[in-house]
Structure formats: structure tokens, C-alpha cells
Image (tube, rainbow, N blue to C red):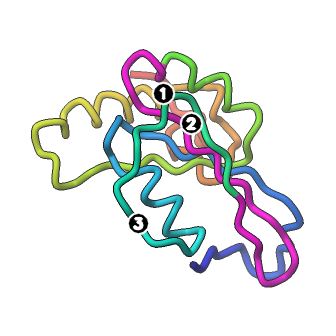
Amino acid sequence: AVIRVAAGEKVKKGKLLVIGLDNAGKSSLVARLCGEEVRTLMPTRGFAIRSIKLSGGGVISLWDVGGRHDVRAYWNAYYGKVESLIFVIDATDRRRMEEASEVLIRLLDDASLAGKVGAPARARAGWPAR
């Protein structure tokens, strides 16, 4: 797996939050990034932390957080603990695309994500909420 960092920037340690709806493929993505074969995975009930060692000696921790509706209310507890985030969408699940869109819009409007690397442009730019 290749993780790109801005030119000249050295990463010693980083924390990346991986979120999205349940069954969106978050744990599969994390497994692939860690160089593992993707098999049938059990749903993430809470969260799991995995690490990737970078060629320059740095380490990125991937915080894979469950996406069930009842778990999403706790996502914001992780925002202050990570530097960046990935929102995973299952583009093949058309019946849940609207729900994914609504959840993503709420993230885009969340002021607590402002200033995060890779944070939604809306939060980073300080755009007003909808």
C-alpha cells in the first residue's frame, strides 16, 4: 500500500480515522492497506486499531470505527484524537447511497473537524453549515 505525504513532509506517527456506514467496506480497506488478504470479515462492533509502517520509518495508525447507526453517535469522540479521516462509501450499494450522502453532509458541517488534514473541504474552509 502506498500512502502519499506532502513533499518534504516527514511522518513519524499519525492517526487516521476510517468511518462510513456499516458494511461500506471500512475493515476491508484497512486490511488491504495493511497488506492483508481481504476475507469475510465480521462487522466492527466498536473500533479496531491497526498500524502501517511507512518506508521512512513512520507509523500510521488506522482507527477502524463501526458504522452502525447506534455507533455513529460516538464518532465525534474520535475526532480530536486523529489527524485525518477517510469516509468510505460502498458505491455498489445504491439503496443506501442517500443515507451515506446524509451522513457525509453531517460530517461536512461538523465544525469539530475544521483544521484536520484530509478533513472535508467544507469544515476546513470554515464554510457555514447548511
Local secondary structure at mark 1? loop
User: In this picture, which residue range is highlighted in magenta?
Assistant: 51-72
The residue carrying pointer 2 sits among few (fewer than 14), some (14 to 19) or many (20 or more) residues within 10 Å by Cα, namely: many
Q: What residue would you read off at disc 3?
A: 38
Can you tell which of label 1 and label 3 is closer to the viewer? Answer: 3
Distance between the Cα atoms at labels 2 and 3? Answer: 33 Å
Residue 7 higher or lower than 39, as above or below: below
Distance between the Cα atoms at labels 2 and 1? Answer: 6 Å
Which residue appears at 72% of the width and 74% of the height? Answer: 6
Which residue appears at 57% of the width and 19% of the height? Answer: 74
Q: Which quadrant: the N terminus?
A: bottom right
Q: Is residue 60 left or right of residue 120?
A: right
Mark 2 or mark 1: whose residue is earlier in sequence: 1
Q: Mark on residue 123?
A: 2
Mark 2 or mark 3: whose residue is earlier in sequence: 3
Q: What residue would you read off at disc 1?
A: 109
Which residue appears at 10% of the width and 37% of the height? Answer: 95
Q: Quadrant of residue 57?
A: bottom right
What amino acid is found at the position of numbered circle 1 in the picture?
Asp
Q: Quadrant of residue 58?
A: bottom right
